[in-house]
Amino acid sequence: MTIRLLLSIGILFSSLYATSNYIKQIKVWDACTYTMETIRINLIQLKDKPFEEIDPKTAIDYCLKSLQSYPNDPHVKFLLSRAYAKAKQYKKGYALATEACIAGDLGGCTLVGGYFSHRLVSRKDLAKKSVLLWLWSCSQGDAQACTNLYINASDFFVPKEIKQTRDRLLTFCMDGIYPLACNTYAEECFRAQDNSKVCQEAAKRSCISGNDKGCHFYQVFLKKDQSVSSKTTLSVYRQSCNNGNYKACLSIAHHYRSQPLTKLNNVLALALYEDTCNKGHNATACRYTGHYYLGNFEGITTDISKGLHYLEKSCTPYTIHKEFPSYSSSQTEFDIIGCYDLASYYLHAPQPKYQNRDKAKKTLEKTCQLFQYYKTDQLGCQLNINSCCKHLPSR
């Protein structure tokens, strides 16, 4: 009954709002669709997490169940093939994507083009074949295919095709179908130093969708155009934060911190810093959270245990691992100033019971091994930590 209801709603919204053949072909809305789809239909966002944050095993389980219920739906086969690609089970994924494409599914053809483009299968003329597949899918309304074309295949285009693809990207962006199209369009504007209102709007929409690069382009464009109010910019960043861009959340937190330190501003800043630390794994946000709990701020209950916990968290390296269909990306983050502040607190805490020279030394010893930073090196050297002292001559 639930699936039938979702299907009915999907068909209703497709008929009312869909502007591409790609959207019209989506028949099944279930856990697999919500997990693996990349497009939006009007205000309904099918995908609730960025692709790289989805657990591969969970995605495969969802889509296998969906395929059991809808064994002849080519789009479900495409979504399962995408789940297999995420899990790096490329042989299974390619076979299903090929079946989906032959059955007329645009996403399947786009994904096969992706396999060719990333040379995950052994075929001749892979680059040209990927472009042909993307051209067809793009012409039929697949926003991701158009985006792939514009990013990867400009050498194979004639000018007319480039313009047509760029125009399609703008349409997908403005219709809210595929937020990444906004980012691709804005990035092209950035490269061309085009600061037109259309480019600003594309960057704005990309930023609102939660894309940090889109926010960067938006900020660059606004520096050249002072007509947009700071209130509007703050609103854009709030929406970006709500859509999972924790760098935007950090910017808003900094905004509240820069305002008069009233009870409301303190509470709002701390809430954003703490959320960005815990969910966005941002070390700088952890440091500021620690400062709020350790300090004497109006509206904030001092909690030394929490404050030290967050300073410790800011100083502890955290590896952010992102998984893409054809490659992995890892980034280790920590806040060196948070390390210094933590050690300093242990040495000079206002309450004697929190002063702990041994913990300060351990923090500084670890910090000096992580990164050369004059303040921690100097403080560590004063405490006779050799690993800190040997960094100082290079300063």
Image (tube, rainbow, N blue to C red):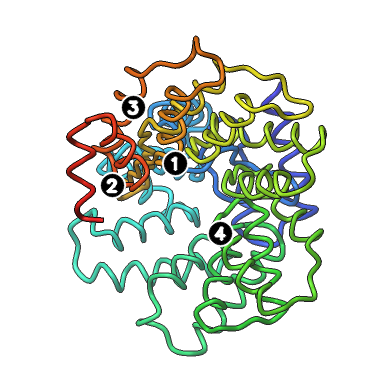
Mark 2–mark 3 Cα distance, whole angstroms, equals 14 Å
In this rendering, would 143 be left or right of 177? left
Q: Nearer the viewer, residue 191 or 158?
A: 191
**Residue count near mark 2 (Cα–Cα under 10 Å), binned few <14, some 14–19, many ≥20:** some
Give the mark nearer the N terminus: 3 vs 1. 1
Residue corresponding to mark 2:
372
Q: Position of residue 298 (x, y in %)?
A: 78, 29
**Residue corresponding to mark 4:** 180
* Circle number at residue 337: 1
Instruction: Point out the frontmost of discs 4 and 3.
Output: 3
Depth check, front residue: 291 or 344: 344
Q: Is residue 300 above or below residue 88?
A: above
Q: Residues within 10 Å of mark 1 (few under 14, many from 20)?
A: some
Left or right: 17, with 349 as reference point: right
- 350 on left or right of 242: left
Q: Secondary structure at mark 2?
A: loop
Secondary structure under badge 4?
helix
Q: Secondary structure at mark 3?
A: helix
Instruction: Return the disc, 4 or 3, that comes first in the chain's sequence.
Output: 4
The C terminus appears in which quarter of the rendering?
A: bottom left
Q: Mark 3 to mark 1: distance in Å?
A: 12 Å
Choose the circle earlier in sequence order: 2 or 3: 3
User: What residue is drawn where x is 29% and y is 41%?
Assistant: 377
Return the disc, 2 or 4, that comes first in the chain's sequence.
4
